[in-house]
Structure formats: structure tokens, C-alpha cells
Image (cartoon, coloured by chain):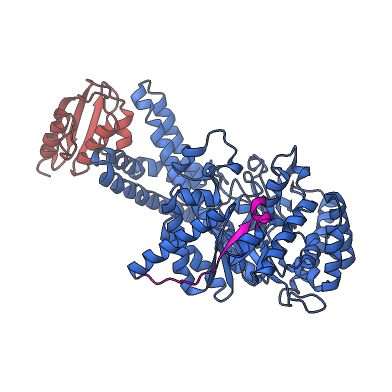
Chain colours: A blue, B red
Amino acid sequence: MLIKRGIPVSPGVAIGPALVMGAESFRIPQRFVSIDAVDTEIARFRTAVESTCQEIELNETLAKERLGSEHAMIFTAHLMMVRDPKILTEIETLIREKSFSPEFAVSRVLRQYAKRFQNLGNHYFAERAADFYDLEKRLLKQLLGEKREELAHLTEPVVLLAHNLTPSETASLDKQFVLGFATEVGGHTSHTAILAGALELPAVVGIGNFLSDLSGGETLIIDGSHGTVIIDPDDETLAKYHDSEERYRSTNKRLESLRLLASETRDGLRITLMGNIEFPEEAESAKHRGAEGIGLYRTEFLYLQSQREPTEEDHYRAYREVLKAFPTQPVVIRTLDLGADKMPGQLQAEYADGINPALSVRSIRLSLTHLELFKTQLRAILRAAVHGDLRIMFPLVTTLLEFRQARMILGDVMEDLDEQGVPFNRDVPVGMMVEVPAAAVLAEEFAREVDFFSIGTNDLIQYTLAVDRSDPAVANLYRAGDPSILRLIRNVITAAAKYHIPVSVCGQMSSDPMFVPLLVGMGLRQLSVTPHAIPELKEVIRNLTQTKAERIASRSESMEVARDVESYLRGELKKICPESME
Amino acid sequence: MSDSQVYRRKVTVKAEQGLHIRPCTAVAQLAMKFQSRVRLMKDTNSPVDAKSILDLMSLAAGPQSELELEVDGPDAAEAMEHLSALFESDFMTPSPAVVP
């Protein structure tokens, strides 16, 4: 029995045989194949060679067009190397006669060539070794890539292990056969982690190098609640985990039965639960969990997924996809909320040096200083808004002037679209995140001009309490229940009520069941939360009455320190939902 | 086969970096255009297949090294002409598009 620890990113327990996916470093998953599989394996190898040739030909054409035929020559050479009958025969012989897996054979033969050149003693030739490593990588990518595709054709349940999973790979996992997964890299906020939560797959990431200890097929336990991966567990451990797997499943079943029930208190007060999403792919699963719209669509992924800025079409496509899941319900798109330090391309260089990114050029400030970037996104939102109830939300607004400026630019974009005769929705509601204390304090002034508020508690807490949550030395000072936070939220709610604009909370605070009675009691009727928290929050709401919630809120608001507020709320939650999981 | 004579000729590698990957590509590409068997021999080593880029590379023929070109087959004469011209021209012939 071997226990590995990583970062728990999606709760639950998964027990099953391990399926190891090829790593980026192209670890060979299997060295030998059975004799009767030889023909299929050779066919698989030939397909990989063909695809590799096509890939190289494409590079050759591109290089010819862009760099001239002299530079394309290297690809011509690579192509000839891959097609060289000598190499192909050598590899096929190893597969046929020694039952080597194609991956193993490719690696073996190409590395031998590489070594031979390295040993020629002439450095011009020694450098050619790199060409063989490059070819090895290309071929393995084709061979293992195919393996990755096999994920779509699983026939028995497995626990998936990989160096890394791309968000799109994660999104396409078949829940029927993939019980859970664990990866060597990744962190809490990695997109893969967020998607795992959305898919409700128990997952542990950031384990570090552990795949080399495994060959696949071992029994594995993934404990996504505690961040442990147990390889070849003993009987006692296995029994223990089977129990908790069962318990987890029955709790989930109970929550699942809530999905179709209304989100309202016992005395009939409707609380709208919406989803926070990061990828368009999450919209569908948010809906499945009972989200009545998207209260926060973080668009950062569009900027981070490639090294170039997203085009208007990239934005547009993503927004349309979200609208597919929610054709009539509200979908709130938050414009770019990144620091310059996290932006791809040359923007990064502009600001990177030693400045505190949280207090520097980020979010709306970045948009207002890089108008082309901003306008591209706004154009796409306005265009997509023709197809549903899209809304625009500006992040990190600190002063009224900023909001007015942003709105003016939106006006410019509308004018452009008008002139170009491009259809768009002129009546898109424009709101703002309230996440800077300055904006919370001046909520009344803002409320006169904006169409809606959404309180972003994560940043609001960080800026109010002067705590960076990711710094372990001060993380314990980060408290959503701090009276100062409650006071600011109260101020925002009062201002919104005075000017009759909707207000919601979209920070992590609203996804925590213990804060739900408080927020409802303070007057919030809309919460935007992590989609997988929806059933649990609904259960809390359905066990609540308005009077009870208001009593809890006023009691909490009278307390002086965060610790008291939070322990009081925890106690109340237990009374409201005795069955609720801790 | 009427023309089954084996042609042999000494060629010199003029390329500054020897029979490097680009010259190898050029030689193999040209050799493949002919039906004849084309082989290259360095010193007394056993001859290699000039249609295999790997074989050519494994010659590790440095600049100014002397090689023996051996062509054998139906279009041997023509092949010999073109291939030795390629060596003569410092491997520029088949790709006139390449600007030196």
C-alpha cells in the first residue's frame, strides 16, 4: 500500500483500477503487447506514421510560405527520415518479432539512431541527434494521442491518472466510466480542478511525480475530499473507503433529488440560485444542477488558453455556447478580470516588475488602458446578446469615473456596430462588481447609475481586511464573517433597494452553506455560486424561513468579531440542516 | 536490361558542414528519382544506400571528404550525371529556389 498526497479539488471517493495516460514527457505506458495483437499494433503504428507525415508536411508548407524553402528543408529531411524504409522496418520488426509495443519500439529505434549520431565524434552530426528525438516525440504524440482518444471508448470503469489533463480533456471525460482522476501537476484554481468540481468527479491534483511508480491496472483509491491517492490499498483501508464511498453517494442522491425542486424558503420566499462558470462547457452542467442562469461567467480562460489575444469570434463563440444552455435565463458576462502580470503576450512585460499586481493595472483598469482589447470583448458580447439575456458586468470598479468611462466605451462600440450594420442588442443591462471597499462605501452613488450590483466577496475581503488568502502566513485573517464585511454588504444591499436595482453575491462566501441564512436574512434574493454547491444550498434554503433568516442576520450583524459570527452561523446551520454534510 | 553497366565515380563533399542533413536530403531526393540502385561509399566502409537519408547521414562525411558514388541499373548513366552534378554544385542544383 502506497499513499500519495496532493491537493483535493473535487470531493468524493473513487475506487477502481488505474488507467495511466501518457504524460507530456511521453512515458511509455506499456512495453509489450500480446502476440495476437501484433497486427493491430502494427496497423496502429502505420497510422501514427501517416499522421506524423501529414503533420510534418503541414509544417513544411507553412515554413515554405513564411520563411522560404531553405527553412522548409529541415521538414523535408524529417519527412524523409520518417519515411525511411530502414527505420520503419526496424520498428516493425521489433513489434512483430519481440512483441514490443509500438511506443516502446519507436522510442528504442529512434534513440539508437540518436546515440549513433552523438557518437560520430563530429559535432555537426552530433547535433542531428536532436532530429531523432524530435521525431520520436512526434511519433509518440501520435501513438499516445490515440491512447488519449481511447478515453472516449472506455468499456469499464477506471480511475484516471495523468501527468496533466487539459480542460477540454477533462470536460470530455465520460462519467460513466471515469470514476475519478489524479494528476501530477495542477493546483486549486487550475481550470482542470474547476471542471472536475463541475463534473462531480473526485479528483486530486498536484501530487508530484508518481506515475513512474505505476504501470496501470493497480487498484487505486482517490479521496478527493482529503487529497489522498492510495495505491494497492490493504483490505482494511479498502473496506473503510467503500463505506465512505457509499455514504458520499447516498448524500449525493439525497441532494440530487432536490435538483428539480424550487429554491424557496418554507414560507415561500424565492431565492434565485445561479451558477458561476469559467468555461462555456460548464454551463450545461450548471443547468443540470438547477442553476437558474449564470450569475458570473469569468471570461479569463479565453485569454489564458492560448498565447494570443482572443479574437472577437473566439469571444462570440464562447458566449453563444453558454446561451445554448440558457437561452432565456440571465447570463452575466464579466469583462476581463486579469492583472497585466497574467496577460499573455507583450502586455505582461509592461507591468511585471515587482509591483503588487493586486493593486496595479488589472481588470477594468487594464480594459480602460487597452481599448482595443476591451472593445473586442464588448463587441462580441453585444452581438451575442441578440440571442439571449446577456448582461455585462465590469469588475473592480473603484470610482464612478471609471464606470462612466467604461460605459462610454460601450456606447462607442454600439455606434461602431450601428455604422457597420452589425446586429446587436442595444439594451444589454450593464452592472458592476462591488469588490473594492471604495465602491461598497459609495454604493448609493453607484446605484443611481448601474443596472445591477454583484458583490464579489473574494476581493472585497482581500481589500478590506488587507489579506492575501494565498499567503499561508496570513490566510487565517481572511474571514468572510468579519463585521466590516457584513457592514459593507449591508450598505450595498440598502443602496440597491433604494434605487430598485438587483443585487447578488457571487463570491465564494455565497457558496458556503453557513453564510446562506445570513445573506438571505440581510435581504439578498439572488446568489451566484459554484454550480456543484447548488443542491446543497437549495437544501439550506428550503429548510429556512424568512423570519428565521432575518433573525440570524440581525444577530450576526450585532457581533463584534469574525470568530463569533462564524461559530454562531455554523451552529445555526446545524440546527437548520442537521443532515447536511460538514 | 540493356544498360546494366555499373558506374563508379569519385565525388567530393564541398559543403562547409560536410554531408549534413540538407545535402543528405538533396542527395536522397535526387537518388529516389531514378530506378537504379545508388550507393555511396566512404573509405573502405561498406557502401550505403543513397536513397536512405539515414544511411547517408550515418556516413558522417565531413567537408572535403572523398566518396565513391556507385550507380547500377537501367537509368544508371543519367543518374550518375545528375548526382555527380549535385555534388559538383555543392548541393544547390535540385533546389534552384534556394538563395545561397
Q: Which of A516 and A465 is in front in this view?
A: A465
Count of marks placed on residues: 0
Residue A434 falls within the magenta-colored stretch: yes
Horizontal and vertical percent position of residue A151: 57, 58
Q: In which quarter of the image is residue A523?
A: bottom right
Q: Where is residue A178 in the image (x, y as percent from the top left)?
A: 65, 60
Q: Is residue B34 above or below residue B70?
A: below
- Is residue A365 among what the camera can see? yes
Image quarter of residue A435: bottom right
Residue A40 in the image: state x and y as whole percent.
48, 56
Quarter that holds the N terminus of chain A: top right
Q: Residue furthest bottom?
A: A268
Question: What are the residue bounds of the magenta stretch?
Answer: A422-442
Q: In which quarter of the image is the C terminus of chain A?
A: bottom right
Q: Residue at x 86, y 51 (%)?
A: A560
Give the camera-side residue of A437 and A482: A437
Whether residue A266 appears in magenta in the rendering, the answer is: no
Q: Can residue A305 be seen in this view?
A: no
Above or below residue A427? Residue A531 is above
Q: Nearer the viewer, residue A510 or A536?
A: A510
- What residue is at 46 percent from the left and 43 percent from the top? A347
| Image x and y of residue A304, in percent | 51, 50
**Residue plotted at (50% across, 48% down):** A366
Q: Is residue A188 left or right of residue A232?
A: left
